[in-house]
Image (tube, rainbow, N blue to C red):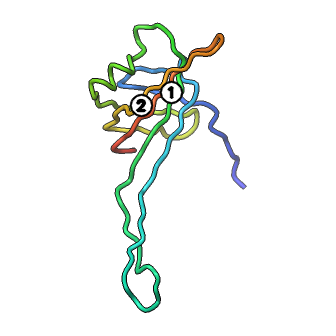
Amino acid sequence: MADVTFIERSVVQVNGVDLDDLILSVSEKSTRPTKAVNTMNKERVAKGFKQGNNQYSLDIDAERIVDARVPDWHALKDAGAVLKITIRYNIGPSVTYGGCKIQDVTDTTSDGDSTRKISIMARTRR
């Protein structure tokens, strides 16, 4: 059996700027909508399936800090800016998401802790 190495950390890069210190977690999701094709046949079962295009989304949990290198997520969302996000893991190849747009920004402040959750849709994954 081959030696197994676990991915322990990742560095998120947004438009060429590393945000490794402020990113708490990154959640990647890839979906492909699938729908049954119903026909009127004797067996009363679906004839097959129709598949849509691949859809990619990212959920990023980040610290809220005041720093010039940290993007203004609200301004990027309001402007409809197109981003390129690269995730570099400690082991193996990196993943680059292209044509990214910010869908949702949620700010949370609790006793002594302040975080921001950013939901992003991407067109491509390489």
Quadrant in which residue 110 is drawn: top right
| Amino acid bearing label 2 | Asp
Residue under circle 1?
117
Q: Position of residue 60 (x, y in %)?
A: 50, 30
Q: Residues within 10 Å of mark 1 (few under 14, many from 20)?
A: many
| Amino acid bearing label 1 | Lys
Question: Is 116 above or below relative to 49?
Answer: above
Looking at the rendering, in which quadrant would you find the C terminus? top left
Q: Position of residue 37 (x, y in %)?
A: 38, 74
**Residue depicted at x 52% and y 27%:** 11
Q: Of 89 and 81, which appears nearest the observer?
A: 81
Residue under circle 2?
104
Looking at the rendering, in which quadrant would you find the N terminus? bottom right
Q: Tag 2, which secondary structure?
A: strand
Q: Confirm or deny contact between disc 1 and disc 2 (CB under 8 A).
A: yes
Q: Tag 1, which secondary structure?
A: strand
Question: Is 73 above or below relative to 87?
Answer: above
Question: Is 65 above or below relative to 62?
Answer: above
3D distance between C-alphas at marks 1 and 2: 8 Å
Quadrant in which residue 123 is drawn: top left
Q: Residues within 10 Å of mark 2 (few under 14, many from 20)?
A: some
**Residue depicted at x 50% and y 41%:** 28
Q: Position of residue 47 (x, y in %)?
A: 40, 80
**Residue depicted at x 35% and y 60%:** 52
Q: Of 63 and 91, which appears nearest the observer?
A: 63
